[in-house]
Image (tube, rainbow, N blue to C red):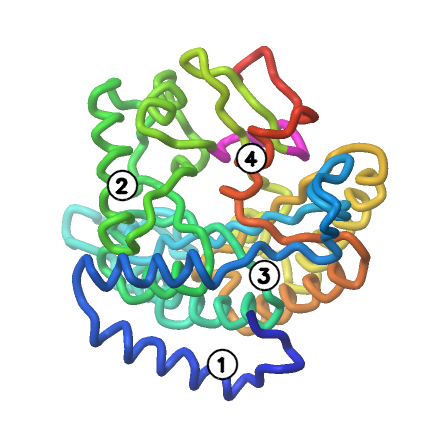
C-alpha cells in the first residue's frame, strides 16, 4: 500500500510500467492465478482507525462509516452500434457494422481511465470493487489482471451488454455463468458479487445467483446499509448501489461539472457520517472507466477522498468484504420482502 507521502506520480508510472512488463511476460492461466495469489497477500482491507478489540457497534473496530466504490470496467464490452454513448444514434445502423466514434469514447476507459484511477486508489490506499463485463476483461486481460493484482475485487457484470431480465431461466443461467467464467479465466479470481446491466434483473436472477455460488448483488437502491434477503431458503447479501452518487448518471447524463459532482458526494458523505453515530451507514459511489478516469474527474475524486479521510473512523471497503461482514453480523437488517 502506498500513500501520497511515500509514492510520487513518477514513481507510480514507473511501477505500473514494470508491472505491465512482468504481466506481459507471463501469459495464460498460470499467470492469472499467480497474480490473484499476489493480490490476496498484498491487499489488506483499508480500515483506518480499526482497533484490535474486535467488532464495534456497527462496523469492525472503530469504524464509523464505510465507503464502497464501484469501478465499472466496461470498455471493450459495449454493443457495436453506439448504445449508451454521448453521440447521436447512427441514422442508418444497418449500413455500418460498428460505430467508430463511440468505440473511441469507450477505448478511453481502458487506455487512460482505469490506469489513472488505479494510481489514484494506490495513492490513498483505497481498495474498490470492479464489476467487469466479460468481453472487456477478455479483450484487455493485462488490465483486468492488474486490477486484481493491485488488491481490488473482480466482480461480475455479465459477459456482454444484454437485457438478461428478458431471458428464460436456463438462458439467463448460462449468461451469468459465462460472464463468471470469462472474468475468472483472465484474473484467476472467481466473482462472488453481481451487477446486472442498468440494475435490471429478472424474476430468476437472485435464485440463479444463489445457485451459482454468489454471496451478494448490488442491484438495489433501497437502503444506505447492507442487508440480507432470503433466496432459495438461504441468506443472500445486498450491498446497495447508487444513482445519486453515480458519474454516468450525473456527469454524463446530466452534464454535471466535476466541481458539482464533488459537491454532491461531499454533502452525501457529511450527512451519512452524522447519521452513522446512531446506526450502520454505508456510502456507495460509482466510477465508470471512461468518465471518472478523466483528469478533471480524478482530481475531484482525489479531493473527495481527502475530505472523507480527514474524519476519524472512515473506511473504504470492497463489496465482497462488506457482504461477508454483513452475513455474519447479528446487527445486519433482514428484509422480509424481495423487491
User: As displayed, is residue 225 above or below residue 142?
Assistant: above
- Closer to the N terminus: mark 2 or mark 1? 1
Asked whether residue 253 is in view, the answer is no
- The residue that disc 2 covers is 179
Please give the residue where the numbered disc 1 appears in the rendered image. 12
Q: Nearer the viewer, residue 63 or 10?
A: 63
Q: Earlier in the sequence, mark 2 or mark 3?
A: 3
- The span from disc 2 to disc 3 (Cα, nearest Å) is 26 Å
Residue occupying image coordinates x 59% and y 40%: 242
- Disc 1 is placed on an element classified as helix
Pointer 2: residues within 10 angstroms few (<14), some, or many (20+)? many
The span shown in magenta is 217-225
Q: Residue at x 85, y 39 (%)?
A: 277
Q: Nearer the viewer, residue 116 or 35?
A: 35
Q: Residue at x 39, y 59 (%)?
A: 148
Q: Main secondary structure of the magenta part?
A: loop
Q: Quadrant of residue 304?
A: bottom right
> Does residue 163 appear left or right of residue 86 in this picture?
left
Q: Earlier along the polypeptide chain: callout 3 or callout 1?
A: 1
Q: Which residue is mark 3?
A: 126
- Badge 4 is on which residue? 239
Q: Nearer the viewer, mark 2 or mark 3?
A: 3
Q: Residue 150's mark? A: none
Residue 137 drawn at (x, y percent): 28, 55
Amino acid at each position: 500500500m502506498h500513500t501520497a507521502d511515500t509514492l510520487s506520480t513518477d514513481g507510480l508510472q514507473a511501477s505500473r510500467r514494470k508491472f505491465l512488463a512482468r504481466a506481459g511476460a507471463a501469459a495464460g492461466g498460470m499467470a492469472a492465478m499467480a497474480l490473484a495469489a499476489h493480490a490476496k497477500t498484498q491487499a489488506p482491507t483499508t480500515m483506518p482507525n480499526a482497533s484490535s478489540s474486535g467488532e464495534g457497534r456497527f462496523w469492525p473496530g472503530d469504524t464509523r462509516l464505510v465507503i464502497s466504490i464501484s469501478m465499472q470496467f466496461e470498455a471493450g464490452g459495449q454493443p457495436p452500434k453506439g448504445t449508451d454513448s454521448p453521440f447521436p444514434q447512427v441514422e442508418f445502423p444497418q449500413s455500418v457494422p460498428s460505430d467508430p466514434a463511440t468505440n473511441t469514447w469507450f477505448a478511453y476507459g481502458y487506455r487512460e481511465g482505469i490506469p489513472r484511477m488505479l494510481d489514484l486508489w494506490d495513492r490513498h490506499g483505497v481498495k474498490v470493487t470492479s464489476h467487469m463485463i466479460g468481453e472487456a476483461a477478455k479483450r484487455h486481460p493485462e488490465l483486468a489482471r492488474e486490477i486484481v493484482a493491485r488488491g481490488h475485487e473482480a466482480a461480475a457484470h455479465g459477459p456482454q451488454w444484454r437485457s438478461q431480465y428478458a431471458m428464460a431461466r436456463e438462458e439467463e443461467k448460462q449468461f451469468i455463468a459465462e460472464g463468471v467464467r470469462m472474468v475468472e479465466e483472465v484474473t484467476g479470481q472467481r466473482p462472488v458479487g453481481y451487477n446486472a446491466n442498468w440494475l435490471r434483473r429478472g424474476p430468476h436472477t437472485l435464485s440463479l445467483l444463489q445457485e451459482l455460488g454468489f454471496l451478494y448483488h448490488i442491484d438495489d437502491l433501497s437502503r444506505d446499509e447492507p442487508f440480507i434477503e432470503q433466496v432459495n431458503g438461504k441468506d443472500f447479501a445486498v450491498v446497495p448501489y447508487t444513482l445519486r452518487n453515480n458519474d454516468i448518471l450525473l456527469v454524463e447524463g446530466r452534464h454535471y461539472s466535476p466541481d458539482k459532482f464533488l459537491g454532491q458526494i461531499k454533502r452525501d458523505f457529511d450527512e451519512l457520517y452524522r447519521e452513522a453515530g446512531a446506526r450502520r451507514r454505508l456510502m456507495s459511489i460509482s466510477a465508470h472507466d471512461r468518465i471518472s478516469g478523466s483528469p478533471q474527474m480524478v482530481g475531484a475524486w482525489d479531493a473527495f477522498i481527502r475530505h472523507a479521510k480527514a474524519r476519524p473512523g472512515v473506511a473504504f471497503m470492497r463489496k465482497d468484504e462488506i457482504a461477508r461482514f454483513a452475513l455474519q453480523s447479528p446487527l445486519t437488517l433482514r428484509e422480509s420482502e424481495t423487491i
